[in-house]
Amino acid sequence: MSASPGDTELYERIYQVVMQIPHGAVATYGDVALIVGGGCDGRIVGHALSELSPERALAVPWQRVINREGGISTAGLAQRQMLEAEGLIFSTDGRVSLVRYRWHGPDAAWAEAHGCRTLPPREEGEQLSLF
C-alpha cells in the first residue's frame, strides 16, 4: 500500500525530524511524533519509517528511532548493529539507556523554521506521554 498525498507530506516532516537525530543518539517514536505535531503519533512514525525506500534509508537514519522502553521494534539484527556501530551499548535485555542516549530534540530555531515543536523539558529518565 502506498501513502496518500497527505501521508506523503506528513512522512516528509517525520523524515526531516529523524534526520536531526545526531550520530550516537536515539529518539523514541513518541518523541518524533511530538516534535512533528499535527496529529502525528508513534504508530504513524513507525509506518513512515517502514515505507522508506532502500535508497532513502541511506539518508534518513531510521535506526535511531526506538521504542519508549529503549528497545528495538524492527525484526532482525540490522538496527542493533547500526546503533552499536555508532557507539550505543545495549543491556543484557536488549535495551539502550534512554537516560544516556536520548536526544533532547531540535533546537527552537530549527523547530520554528520547520513548523515543528521542541520537546518539553523532563526529569532524567522521564517518559513523555502521548495521550
Image (cartoon, rainbow, N blue to C red):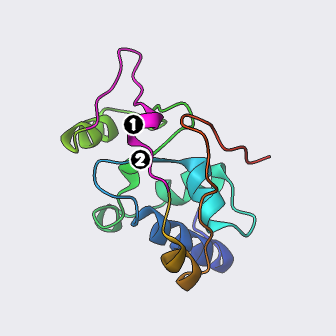
Which residue is farthest left?
A: 85
What segment is highlighted magenta in the picture?
A: 88-104
Residue 129 position, x and y percent, is 72, 43
- Where disc 1 sits, the SS reads helix
Q: Residue at x 48, y 33 (%)?
A: 70
- According to the image, label 1 marks what residue? 100
Q: Which disc is residue 26 wearing?
A: 2
Answer few, some or many: residues within 10 Å of disc 2's Cα (few below 14, many 20 plus, some between 14 and 19).
Answer: many
- Where disc 2 sits, the SS reads loop
Q: Decide which of 63, 107 is in the foreground and name it.
A: 107
Which residue is farthest top?
A: 92
Label the magenta part by its dominant secondary structure.
loop
Residue 99 position, x and y percent, is 46, 35
Q: The disc labelled 1 sits on which kind of residue?
A: Arg
> Along the polypeptide, which appears first: circle 1 or circle 2?
2
Classify residue 60 by image quadrant. bottom left
Nearer to us of marks 1 and 2 is: 1
In the shown orientation, is residue 40 left or right of residue 75? right
Q: Residue at x 31, y 35 (%)?
A: 80
Q: Residue at x 44, y 44 (%)?
A: 102
Residue 72 appears in view: no
Residue 123 on the magenta segment? no
Residue 10 position, x and y percent, is 61, 72
Residue 27 position, x and y percent, is 48, 49
Which residue is farthest bottom?
A: 113
Residue 99 on the magenta segment? yes
Residue 100 appears in view: yes
As measured in the structure, the alpha-carbon distance from the residue carrying label 1 to the one carrying label 2 is 10 Å
Q: The disc labelled 2 sits on which kind of residue?
A: Val
In the depicted structure, whether residue 68 falls above or below residue 131: above
In the shown orientation, is residue 86 left or right of residue 100? left
In the depicted structure, whether residue 17 falls above or below residue 5: above
